[in-house]
Image (cartoon, rainbow, N blue to C red):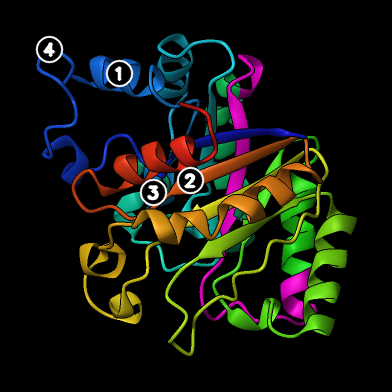
Amino acid sequence: MGEILVGTCSWTDRALVGSGWYPAGRQDAEGRLRHYAGRFPVVEVDATYYGMPSVRNSRLWAERTPDGFRFDVKAFSLLTGHPTRPAALPADLRSGASGAELMDEVWRRFSGAVEPLRAAGRLGSLLFQFPPWFAPGARAEEFLTRCRARTEGWPVAVEFRHPEWWRGERRQESTAAFLRELGVAAVAVDMVQTLPVSIPPVTPVTDDRLTVMRFHGRNAAWGAGSKEERFRHRYKDEELREWVPRVRGMAERADVVHVLFNNCCGDAAVRAAESMRQLLGQV
């Protein structure tokens, strides 16, 4: 049986910071991370999707967490084909470089900024979350192959937002086989199942070293509204209990399972993570 690490998709989310979960005296940047890392063994770095990471922050994160703690670092939006505001780029890249030259430089800086986490043994995975229009096909597979070539030797996890990657037994087998060939971990998803864009609740394990499970909540506003509206959901124990045998089944096929809660509404994610740990017998 592999190790199951449970945590959340951010420790700095504004709603969490304002919820009162962090005690007095632990509300500065260092205090928050140390408090979080004393309660959970893994966290996703969500901020790196919106802006480039820095070497300084990676070093500080490594220094402020214990041995065995893991960060899943979300890939910068430009690297996964999402629209990216020029202001999100480093100042010296906002004009001049473009196309392949810009991508090469962004890749170089992104990987360099994350390297201190890997060197310290804190990197759980680089998480590539692709947009809803990233559909199965030759172009998508070529793009993924290039991404993997740039991250050779790094632990990588892939989440698809286009449901056709996992709809139907034949497509599931094809997608899993392709990710297995690339040597990357598939990301399983829990979300509302009543929308055309709903990702099926499948649990593919495509890398025997690591697999990732992300809980997005079950809000029907997933396809519209603000971030808070899309992810607003407080998991009930019976909803989490559905996933306990599935998570354990994933752990039978992989060395490590990362279980991450993305239902960012106040302290909903940390409370769900605490409940999941109890249901798994970890508390």
Quadrant of res 9: top left
Do residues under tags 2 and 1 come within 8 Å of each other at their CB atoms?
Answer: no
Give the amino acid at mark 3.
Leu
Give the amino acid at mark 1.
His
129 displayed left or right of 150: left
The residue lying at 17 percent from left, 46 percent from top is: 15
Instruction: Choose the circle earlier in sequence order: 1 or 4.
Output: 4
Q: Which residue is mark 2?
A: 260
**What is the secondary structure assignment of the residue under circle 4?**
loop
Residue 143's mark?
none
Q: Which residue is mark 1?
A: 35
Quadrant of the image containing the C terminus: top left
Q: Which residue is mark 4?
A: 25
Instruction: Choose the circle earlier in sequence order: 4 or 3.
Output: 4
Magenta stretch bounds: 118-141
**Do we see residue 133 in this rendering?**
yes
Q: Is residue 12 above or below residue 29?
A: below
The residue lying at 79 percent from left, 38 percent from top is: 209
Residues packed near mark 2 inside 10 Å, few (<14), some (14 to 19) or many (20 plus): many
Quadrant of res 10: top left
**What is the secondary structure assignment of the residue under circle 3?**
loop
Q: Which residue is mark 3?
A: 89
